[in-house]
Image: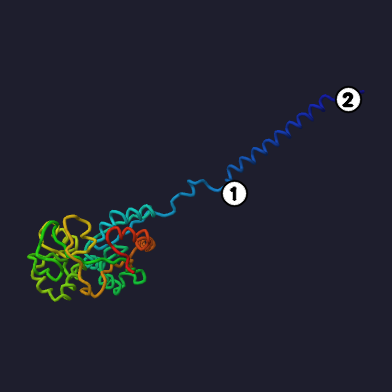
Amino acid sequence: MKLKKGPMVGVRGCLGMHLALLALVILIGGQAQVFAGGRKDNTPPSDAAQSAPTNAPVTIMVAAAASLEYSYVQELIPLFKQKYPWITVEGTYDSSGKLQTQIEEGLGADVFMSAATRQMNALADKNLVAKESIKPLLENKIVLIKPAGTNPPVTDFQTAPQANTIALGDPASVPAGQYAKEAFTTLGIWDAVEAKASLGTNVTEVLNWVGEGSADIGVVYATDAATTKKVEVIAEAPAGSLAQKVIYPVGMVVASTHPKEAQLFIDFLASDEGLAIFKNYGFSPNK
């Protein structure tokens, strides 16, 4: 009697189909695990992942001499923001003496840049500015100015007492006024100048007084005179009338809550890029 082979063939066929399906399930499951578990290869992350911000937004305050306001606001701070977009720089501008007092009283500044070494050294001596951070960055000049288009009987610093009215920064707190007093004292004419002087709270106020014609002459920085066509320069302070150069130092305030960002700003000011901008505004790098 012969056995029928039909059913056995059917069983083998079904078994083959089951094995094929099982292999397919394993293959699909493995691929799903790869996608679920993340990348298995060494493909680098996308550009979007690489460019994700790694720095939290930070705001720092710079206390700077009034004569620095134009260069800071117009170019330096915007360019720094482009380089370090997570850092916002806010500025407060006034006479260096006033800013010194404000820092002593707790002004929340991170960086201080003065128009003379006197105020910077005073804060460093009180451990309010970090001595190791101070850079004697810039040099400026002291000039005698008059309202544009006028002809006062003054041709240089020596003849300043011939003017009826003289505008000066207050020597008690304004570096430009301190330099003016020193120059006139060296020339032996301070008493005559002081008798006709009106004292401004910062150099910008002095510049405006002369520009508006409220004073016949005044003493400001060369960089200030260059910012307006309302005044004309009569002369620079004569050689030897000042014991030291007019230096603008910058340093970090010890109480800064963002010292890393403050140092970045100081380094930027001292960079070739920063110094080139200062030169455009009439300053010279201190050498």
Q: Secondary structure at mark 2?
A: loop
* Picture disc at residue 3: 2
Q: Position of residue 169 (x, y in %)?
A: 17, 66
Near mark 2 (Cα within 10 A), the count class, few <14, some 14-19 or many ≥20, is few
Q: Which residue is denoted by mark 1 in the rendering?
A: 42
Colour convention:
rainbow
Residue 131 as seen in the image, left or right of residue 140: right
Q: Is residue 47 above or below residue 179?
A: above
Q: Secondary structure at mark 1?
A: loop
Q: Quadrant of the rendered structure where residue 190 is?
A: bottom left
Residue at the image position 61 percent from the left and 43 percent from the top: 34
Which mark sits nearer the N-terminus, 1 or 2? 2
Residue 49 as seen in the image, left or right of residue 79: right
Q: Nearer the viewer, residue 196 or 19?
A: 196
Q: Nearer the viewer, residue 30 or 225?
A: 225
**Amino acid bearing label 1:** Asn
The image quadrant where one finds the N terminus is top right
Residue at the image position 79 percent from the left and 30 percent from the top: 12
Residue at the image position 59 percent from the left and 49 percent from the top: 42
Q: Nearer the viewer, residue 221 or 270?
A: 221
